[in-house]
Image (cartoon, rainbow, N blue to C red):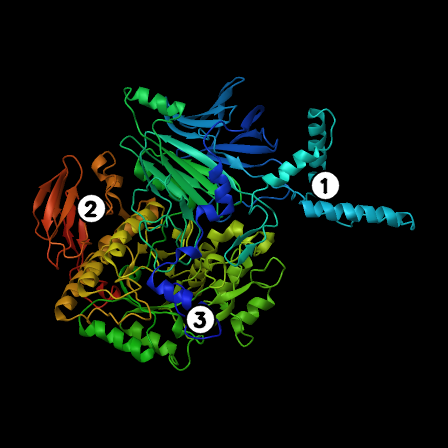
Amino acid sequence: MAAAPGRRGPWALAWGSLCLAAALAVDRSNFKTCEQSAFCRRQRSLQPGRSPYRALLQSLQLGPDSVTLQLVNEANKVPLLLELWGLQGNMTRLRIDELNPLRPRFRVPDVLVAEPPAVQPALTRRDEDGAELALGGHRLVVTAEPFRLDVLRGREPLCSVNARGLLLFEPLRPRRRSFSDKVSSSVGSLWDKIKSLFHRETPKEPAAEEAPGAAEASEEAAAAGAAEAAETGGESEKPEAAADADEAAEEPGSWEETFKTHTDSKPHGPTSVGLDFSLPGFEHVYGIPEHAESLRLRTTEAGDPYRLYNLDVFQYEVYNPMALYGSVPLLLAHSARRTLGIFWLNAAETWVDIASNTAGKTLFGKMLDYMQGGGETPQTDVRWMSESGVIDVFLLLGPEPGAVTAQYASLTGTQALPPLFALGYHQSRWNYNDEEDVAAVERGFDEHDIPCDVIWLDIEHADGKRYFTWDPSKFPQPRAMLQRLAAKKRKMVSIVDPHIKVDSGYRVHNELRARGFYVKTKDGSDYEGWCWPGSAAYPDFTDPAVRAWWAGMFAYEQYEGSAENLFTWNDMNEPSVFSGPEVTMHKDAVHRGGWEHRDVHNLYGFYVQMATAQGQLQRSGGRERPFVLSRAFFAGSQRYGAVWTGDNAAEWDHLKISIAMCLSMGLAGLSFCGADVGGFFKNPDAELLVRWYQAGAYQPFFRAHAHLDTVRREPWLFGPENTALIRAAVRQRYALLPFWYTAFYRCHRHGQPVMRPLWMEFPDDVATFAIDDQYMIDRALLVHPVTEQGARGVHVYLPGAAEVWYDVASRQKHHAPQTLYVPVTMSSVPVFQRGGTVVPRQERARRSAECMRGDPFTLYVP
C-alpha cells in the first residue's frame, strides 16, 4: 500500500496534494535521478579509459583458501586490499576494501547462509606484468598496470573486471577545510598568540581515550606525509594555489547533499564504490529486480541506470529503470553457449549501467571473436555503483542456467517451502470494514462455489493503526472471527507494518522506547517520521535483540486475539516515511553499531520479514511453517516468505508487466511472487479483471487486492457470466495445487525458479531469449496468458528441437520448434504440457486447499 490520501490527523493537509497526485500517477520529482544523486553523478562522470589503479604484484600472497593483493590508486596513493577466492561449485569471489580505512566500512551480514567453502588457489605464473591463478576449474589472469582481472575457462574468456577502467573506490578521508574554515582558524591562531603574551597556561592533559583507530590513522597520515614530502623534495605543504584547486575540486554533494527540502549531512564524506564487468559473447542480461521492466534488460547509455534502492513508489510506471520496493543485486547473462551471474553484495543505494559493446571490446572479447571463427560477437558491459560499503562480488560461472540459480541459492538460500494453503487463492482489500463484512465476503465464496483459502485485513483493522491490536468497535471479537474461518478450513492474514505509532498509551511503543530499540537520528534521539498512524518511530531491525523482541510479539499471549490460522503481511517496510526524503528514512539516521542508514537501507525490509517469520515459527514451537508476505526485499528474502509487485494499477500494461517482473524475481531466488489481481489502483472493467484472474491463477502467489477508493470487486460482482469465468480460473488453480506444491518443493531443495523463462529450459534456443509474455511452470507446463485487450488470438512459441507439446484444453499434439497462432475466447488460457512429463491434478472442487486433503489424484501423462 503506497502513500495515498491519509484521511485523518494534522499531517493529512500537508500531504494531501502529494498523495492525490500519487493516486493518479507516480510523481517522478519525488525520486532522484542519477544526476540528482551526488555519488552516482561522480561515478558516472568517470569515463572508460586507462585506470589509475595498479596491482602491487610484490604484495601477492597465497593463503590456504584465498589470495590477497594490494592495489594502489596512482592519483591519491591510497592502498586497497583485494581478496580473491575460488569457491566450490564453480564460483569466484572478489572483495576490495581499504587497506587502512579511517573507520571500518560496512560489510553486509546475514544474507549469506554461511561462508561459502573455498578451493585451494595455485599461482601458475607471475612476472613483472601480471600473474595467473588457478581457482578450481578456471583461471584468473591479473594484469598489474592498469589493474584488470580476466576470468577464463580453458582458453575461453568468461568475464573481464575493470577492463574499461571504471573502478572507483572513494576512500574515507578527513574533510578538507573550506576558505571560511581557514579564515576562522587563522583568526583563532592570532588571538591565541596575543593571549599568550599575557597568560601562562599549564599544559593540558591528553584526552583520556582516543577514538578506535585514531592512533593508527595518525601514524598512517604521518607516514603518508613523509612519503609525500620525499616525493616533493621535502616540501610538507602544498602551494596555496594547489590547495585552492583542491577546494574547488571538492564535488558538490560530497559532504552534504540536499534533495528538495531534505539535507543529508554525510558526516563521513564521499564513500562510494564502483566497478565494471565486461561479458564477451553475451548480449542478453536479466535480473536486478525490482523494476517494472521487460525480462531482458535494456542498455542504459541513453538514460538513467537501473536503480536499486527500496522505495515506496505509488502506481509506478512500466518500462522504467526507477527503483521500486525491493532490490536484489544479482544480474544474469545468457547466451547459447553459457550462462553466468554477477552477485554484487552491497546493501546501500546502487545504480547499474548496462552497455552493448562491440567496437570497444576488450582484448579478451576480441580473443573470443577469433576463437569463434573471426566474426563479430556481442559483448555486454555492466557497471555497478554503490554509495558506501565495500566491493564484494560473486561471479557465478554456471555454465548452465540452472547451475547459476543453484549457485546463487547455495550462497543466499532457497525459497522457503510455503504451507499448502498459501498456494491457494487470497482475497484482500484495503479494507474489509468489520467482522460482519469479513463474514459476508467469506460467505460469498461459498454461495458462488469459488474456492478461497485466505481473507486479508489491511491497516484499518487495528486500533488507530496500532499494530498488534484490533479496532474494538469494528473487530471486537477477533478470536471468534478466526475460529469461524478455521471451521471452514480457511485462514486470515493481518497487516503488521514496522512504523510504530508514537503514543504513550500504546504498549508496543512504550516498550520499544524503554529498551532503546528505535533507530536513532544523527543526534542520538529516536528517529520519528510520518506514516499511516501519524507520528511514528521505527524499530532498528538490524539489531538481533530487536528482531528477537519483535518475533516474541507474535506469541499468542502477546498478540492478543491472534490464533493458529492468523498469518502476517509486512507492508511499508522499505521503510516508508511519508515525511522523509524520497518517502523513506534519512540516510544519516543511525543503527546499531553506529552504522548509518545509508549503509543498511536495502536490508531493512529483509530484516523485518526475517523477524516476523521467526515469530510465527516460534509461536508454534517450530511445528508450523510461516507465511509472511513482504513488500520490501533483498537478496536472501526468499528464505522468509512471499513477495509481490507492489501498488500496480488496473491497466493492461500492468497486467502484462507482472509476468516479466515475477520472472525476474524468480531468477533472483524470489519464486513466491505475484501481483495484485485486478490492479491496486483504479477500477478494472470486466474483461481486464477476468484476464487478470486467468493470469494470476498461473502465477506463484495468487491474491486479489484493491485500494480503499476503488469500487468493490469481489469475484461475483461483475455479473453471472464473468463470475463463471473467474470461478473456472480459480478452480484451475486448485486443480493444479499438487503440481504447484511439487514445483515449490523442488525449488526449495534445488534453487530452481518455479515460474521460469523459456530459455532456462531451452538454453540454446535463441528465439526464447527475449520472450517474456509466456513462461514455464517448473519444467512441465508452458503458459501464455492473454494480456491484450480485445484479443482474439495469441502467438505461442513452442520451443525445443524434437520436443512435443500438448494443448491442455484440446489435447492436440504439436511438434516443436514452431510458433502457433492460438485463437482465444474469454474462457481461454493457452497452456501446453511438455511431452514426457507428468502433471498431478485434484479435480474435485472444494472450498479450500485443506478440504482437498485425501481427495484422489489424476495423473496427466501425454
Does residue 1 appear anywhere in the picture? no
Q: Residue furthest front?
A: 241
Q: Residue furthest top?
A: 127
**Which residue matches tag 1?**
215
Q: Within 10 angstroms of label 3, few (less than 14), some, or many (20 or more) residues?
A: some
The earlier-in-sequence mark between 1 and 3 is 1
Does residue 287 appear anywhere in the picture? yes
Q: Is residue 732 left or right of residue 235?
A: left
**Which residue matches tag 3?**
556
Pointer 1 with pointer 2, Cβ within 8 A: no
Residue type beneath disc 3: Tyr
Which residue is at 25% across, 56% downward? 655
Q: Which label belongs to residue 780?
A: 2
Residue mark closest to the camera, 1 vs 3: 1
Residue type beneath disc 1: Ala
Residue 836 percent location from the top left of the image: 15, 42
Which residue is at 61% across, 63% downward? 525
Residue 756 percent location from the top left of the image: 27, 46
Quarter assignment of residue 356: top left
Q: Which is nearer the eye, 454 or 820? A: 820
Q: Is residue 539 left or right of residue 226?
A: left
Q: Which is nearer the eye, 729 or 613? A: 729
**Image: 730 above or below 110:** below
Q: Which is nearer the eye, 307 or 735? A: 307
Residue 351 percent location from the top left of the image: 44, 44
Q: Which is nearer the eye, 755 or 683? A: 683
The earlier-in-sequence mark between 1 and 2 is 1
